[in-house]
Structures are given as C-alpha cells and as structure tokens.
C-alpha cells in the first residue's frame, strides 16, 4: 500500500485533487463567513462531502494499476 497516494499531489487522481481544492476553498469561504459574521446552518456538511470524495478517490487510486510506460501496445 503506497501511502504517498494520500498526500503527494502528483500521485493523486482527479477525485482526490478536486477534494483537496474543494476543502481549501471551503476553508477560505468559512473564514470569510466568520469575518463577515454570517452563518449558514448546513455549511459544515461541505467538509464531510469533500472528505467523502477524497476517500472514494483514494479507494479508486489504490485499486488502479499504474499506467503502462510503453503505452497500450501488446507485443507477441
């Protein structure tokens, strides 16, 4: 099990990358809400959604074989 697929951006798949970007943007938005003294009752659910997307992406990433460096050509 290669743990670097959980923290190395170069080894993440698109689901994981989108989840990380979404989490960062959610944190920024949360900060803006705090600074402007606004409250959205279900806003914290976004964190659970991004974690869920990341976990699903990580499962897909672990179950995907690395790309063949020589392309998809089969030699007989």
Image (cartoon, rainbow, N blue to C red):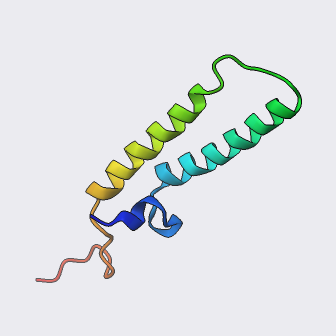
**Of residues 47 and 76, which is closer to you in this image?**
47
Q: Is residue 57 above or below residue 5?
A: above
**Outermost residue to the right:** 36
Q: Is residue 70 above or below residue 20?
A: below
Q: Quadrant of residue 74?
A: bottom left
Q: Quadrant of residue 41?
A: top right
In the shown orientation, is residue 32 left or right of residue 73? right
**Outermost residue to the left:** 76
Residue depicted at x 32% and y 49%:
59
| The N terminus: image quadrant | bottom left
Residue depicted at x 75% and y 43%:
28
Residue depicted at x 52% and y 65%:
9
**Percent x, y for residue 37?**
86, 25
Residue depicted at x 38% and y 51%:
58
**Percent x, y for residue 29?**
76, 37
| The C terminus: image quadrant | bottom left
Q: Is residue 26 above or below residue 39?
A: below
Q: Is residue 64 above or below residue 21?
A: below
**Percent x, y for residue 44?**
61, 27
Number of numbered discs: 0
């Amino acid at each position: 099990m290669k743990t670097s697929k959980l923290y190395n951006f170069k080894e993440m798949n698109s689901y994981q990358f989108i989840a990380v970007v979404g989490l960062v943007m959610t944190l920024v938005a949360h900060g803006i809400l705090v600074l402007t003294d606004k409250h959205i009752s279900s806003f914290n659910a976004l964190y659970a959604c991004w974690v869920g997307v990341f976990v699903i992406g990580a499962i897909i990433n672990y179950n995907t074989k690395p790309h063949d460096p020589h392309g998809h050509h089969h030699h007989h």
